[in-house]
Every structure is written in C-alpha cells, then in structure tokens.
Amino acid sequence: MDTESLRVVYERYYLRVLSVLVHLVGNIEEAEEIMQDTFIKYYFAKTKPDISDESYLRAWLFRVAINGANDRFRKVKKIFSSNFLELGDEREVLKFEIRQDLQQLLAKLNEKEREVVVLKYVEEFSYEEIAAVLKISEGSLKSIASRAIKKMEEEI
C-alpha cells in the first residue's frame, strides 16, 4: 500500500473515527492515540479493505477503532477522564458538564450497549452500518439500543 492511499483514507475518516473514540473513552488524548493506532494497523494490515469498497472500509476501520478503545478500557478500568477541561467561558463549562454527564451514563452501560449507543445516537449511523461494524444482526442491535436507552433513562 502506498502512502497516498493511506492519506486518502485518513482524510476521509479520521474525524468520524476520532469522534466515536472520544465518546467511547472520554479523553481526547487517548482517543487520538487509539485513532493513530487504527490507521497504523490499516497501513500495515496484510488483508485490508480496498479503498473503493467504502462500506467495508468504513466498517473495518470502526471495528478496529472500537476494539482499540475496548482494549484500552480493559487495561485502565475506566472510560473517561476530566483532565481535558480548560476553565473559561461558562458555556464551555456547561458543554463540558453535559459531555461528562453523557460519559457517566455511557460508563454504566456494558461494552456492546456503549458501542451501539455511540454509533447510533451520537454518530448517527444506520442500523445497517452498525451491523456491519459490530457484526451482529439489526434485530439484535435494536434490542441492545432499546435496553441501553432504558438503562440510561433510569439513571437520569
């Protein structure tokens, strides 16, 4: 694989991958590290999706990124850190508090529920896209999403 192809894939997906990772791990620095690992794995993968097969490529990248987040989560036994707050404008503090509240709610979900909620409601993936990323049926996804939303509502 040439570096030009990597550049194209990176430019096309890095913001979406980073956004998912920030919501999963709650820390921009960790999310950036996992994102970098994801694209390094893509570059060096022996069998990787073709750049022209957009749906498979996207599913592959997000699966690798989510696996990286889950690995990191298991290693450090936490999902978020508040060390990236910079005090300042009250609106920024409020935005941080909302993000922190969301991270606390997500932390109460199991791994699969967290993945589904982030992909469906934060990143606005379709059930079809999520099924491709997580390799589970759309029916199972709807059940997981419903159960996760009920858990979150009970916490509010």
Image: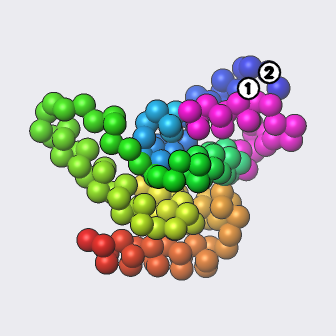
Residue drawn where x is 57% and y is 66% of the image: 112
Label 2 to label 1, Cα distance in Å? 6 Å
Q: Is residue 132 left or right of residue 125?
A: right
Q: Which of the two residues, 71 or 51, is positioned nearer the viewer here?
A: 71
Q: How many dots with numbers?
A: 2
The secondary structure that most of the magenta stretch takes on is helix
Measured as percent of width and height from the top left, residue 2 is found at: 79, 21
31 relative to 138, above or below: above
Q: Residue furthest left?
A: 90
Q: Name the quadrant containing residue 102.
A: bottom left
Q: Which residue is mark 2?
A: 2
State which quarter of the image contains the N terminus.
top right
Q: Residues within 10 Å of mark 1 (few under 14, many from 20)?
A: few
Instruction: Say whether residue 150 is magenta.
Output: no
Measured as percent of width and height from the top left, residue 81 is found at: 38, 44
Q: Which of the two residues, 112 or 3, is positioned nearer the viewer here?
A: 112
Measured as percent of width and height from the top left, residue 83 is found at: 34, 36
Q: Which residues are magenta?
A: 33-58
Residue drawn where x is 53% and y is 48% of the image: 76
Q: Is residue 107 left or right of residue 83?
A: right
Q: Name the quadrant containing residue 88.
A: top left
Whether the residues at callouts 2 and 1 have beta carbons within 8 Å, the answer is yes
Q: Which residue is mark 1?
A: 5
State which quarter of the image contains the C terminus.
bottom left
Q: Amino acid at mark 2?
A: Asp
Measured as percent of width and height from the top left, residue 85 is found at: 28, 36
